[in-house]
Image: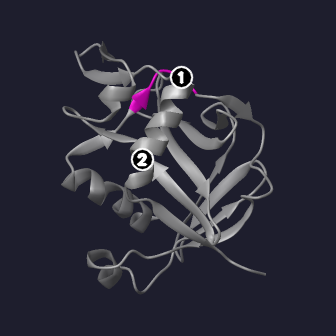
Amino acid sequence: MKKLIGLICIPLLFASCSVALFDKVPGIDQKEFPASLQGDYYLKVPGGLFKKNMNKDTLFFTILPKAYVVKDSTDMERKSLDKDNKLSLVNGVYYVIAQRDEEFPLYWKYSFVEPTKKGAKIYFVIGEREHSPLNKYFRSKLVTVKNNGDSVFVYKSDDVQLAKYFEKVLKKTDALEVIRIKK
């Protein structure tokens, strides 16, 4: 599990980005993952810097009808589709996993799941504080979220703009690639 967090956090640190927060769950709520995505997967280890540190263990993913599981040799985390984890279909084409943010529970984090011939790619919606391409596609506002004065930028979700953002920006970025395990 530490590797998954590391894979997600390292690009965030280098790009001085953070997970983008949205005001609502996008698209049409799906009660379960489509049959085409269900199955067992392993993480394709990226080359270069990461490969050297990740050659002793592998992350595995299982997509069930109403949950997904991430596991390695020492840990397992299961996320069920529920009030805090939603699967949505945006514009009838794009699958988005929306997770309620733990620190700011009124807002949502998005990741796209795109089926591929070998498995799937998972894209995380992240944004820089300034000069983010998100600003071109979504309206945002600074929201005070705690009594101590903490604030966060929140983007107004719009399905049409979200689909455009995925096609024009997100698909051109690095994604976690998972390969289907054939039975």
Q: Disc 2 vs disc 1: Cβ atoms closer than 8 Å?
A: no
Badge 1 marks a residue whose secondary structure is loop
> What crowding class fits label 2: few (fewer than 14 Cα within 10 Å), some (14-19), or many (20 or more)?
many
Whether residue 100 is visible: no
Tell me the quarter of the picture where residue 86 sits: top right
**What residue is drawn where x is 22% and y is 53%?**
13
Residue that label 1 marks: 24
Q: Is residue 39 left or right of residue 172?
A: right
Residue 35 lies, in percent from the top left, at: 80, 56
Depicted 175 relative to depicted 104: above or below: below
Q: Is residue 177 left or right of residue 29?
A: left
> What crowding class fits label 1: few (fewer than 14 Cα within 10 Å), some (14-19), or many (20 or more)?
some
The amino acid marked with disc number 2 is Leu
Residue 113 lies, in percent from the top left, at: 58, 51
Front tag of 2 and 1: 2
Tell me the quarter of the picture where residue 83 sits: top right
Stretch of the chain drawn in magenta: 21-25
The residue nearer to you, when weighing 100 against 169, is: 169
Q: Which sits earlier in the primary sequence, circle 2 or circle 1?
A: 1
The amino acid marked with disc number 1 is Lys
Badge 2 marks a residue whose secondary structure is helix
The residue nearer to you, when weighing 79 against 175, is: 175
Depicted 29 relative to depicted 63: above or below: above
Q: Is residue 47 left or right of residue 16?
A: right
**What residue is drawn where x is 70% and y is 50%?**
67
Residue that label 2 marks: 170
Q: How far is the residue under mark 2 from the one under mark 1?
A: 19 Å
Residue 140 lies, in percent from the top left, at: 34, 19
Q: Quadrant of the C terminus?
A: bottom right
**What residue is drawn where x is 63% and y is 44%?**
95
